[in-house]
Image (cartoon, rainbow, N blue to C red):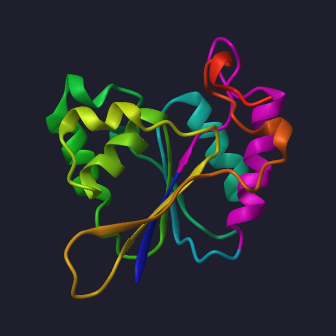
């Protein structure tokens, strides 16, 4: 079986030029969580917050190649559904376990595609910073099965729910 691991980038600075101190800690914990998980490649958005997250995560996964993937940018899928579908097609049925460090919109679009939901359904899917989503392909069966969505069990409570508006945060 092959898996596509999706993770939203860690918490960014206010100007999105990189990661906040909290974000760097989230990325370290994400790397520790994924160590030994069989990931063979890391692809990431070309935006600074994803690039830095990937660099920190890769330190826990020595020898795993890391590459930028323009398709994993932070564009809104409904503005260019063709580009969003091309992103899904590029990473669908990976040759081996791959990690994509990307953005909330793209993770929602991956899940919408796997669940064969209408295009507008990606809007209700939100991922926390460094939340893990896992899709699995089974030999001889079409499509993928979502195994995990937005798992943040690698983060202590004070680092969870970042990236959402304050009214959605838990006390």
Residue drawn where x is 76% and y is 56% of the image: 154
Residue at position x 69%, y 76% in the image: 36
Residue at far left of view = 82
Front residue of 46/127: it is 127
Q: Which of the 4 image quarters holds residue 16? A: top right
Q: Is residue 145 left or right of residue 41?
A: left
Give the image location of residue 10, x and y in percent.
Answer: 67, 37
Which corner quadrant holds the C terminus?
Answer: top right
Q: Is residue 84 visible?
A: yes
Query: In this picture, is 132 found above or below 164?
Result: below
User: Which percent across, then down, holds residue 128?
Assistant: 61, 38
Quarter occupied by residue 25: top right
1 w.r.t. 171: above or below = below
Q: Nearer the viewer, residue 82 or 67?
A: 82
Q: Is residue 64 above or below residue 54?
A: below
Task: Look at the picture and state if 11 lies above or below 144.
Answer: above
Outermost residue to the front: 171
Residue 60 visible: no
* In this picture, residue 118 sits left or right of residue 154: left
Q: Residue at x 55, y 63 (%)?
A: 65
**Could you say which is closer to the camera, residue 94 or residue 109?**
109
Residue found at x 83% / y 42%? 157
Q: Which residues are magenta?
A: 7-35
Residue 94: give x, y in percent of width and height: 35, 69
Check if residue 21 falls in the magenta segment.
yes
Identify the image quadrant of residue 105.
top left
């Amino acid at each position: 079986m092959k898996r596509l691991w999706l993770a939203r980038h860690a918490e960014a600075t206010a100007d999105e030029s990189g990661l906040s101190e909290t974000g760097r800690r989230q990325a370290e914990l994400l790397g520790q969580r994924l160590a030994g998980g069989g990931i063979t490649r890391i692809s990431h958005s070309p935006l600074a917050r994803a690039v830095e997250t990937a660099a920190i995560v890769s330190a826990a996964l020595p020898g795993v190649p890391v590459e930028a993937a323009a398709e994993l940018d932070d564009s809104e899928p409904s503005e260019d559904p063709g580009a969003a579908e091309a992103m899904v097609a590029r990473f669908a049925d990976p040759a081996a376990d791959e990690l994509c460090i990307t953005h909330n919109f793209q993770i929602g679009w991956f899940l919408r595609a796997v669940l064969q939901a209408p295009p507008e359904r990606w809007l209700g899917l939100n991922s926390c910073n460094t939340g893990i989503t896992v899709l699995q392909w089974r030999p001889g069966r079409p499509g993928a099965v979502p195994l995990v969505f937005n798992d943040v069990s690698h983060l202590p409570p004070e680092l969870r729910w970042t990236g959402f508006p304050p009214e959605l945060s838990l006390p």
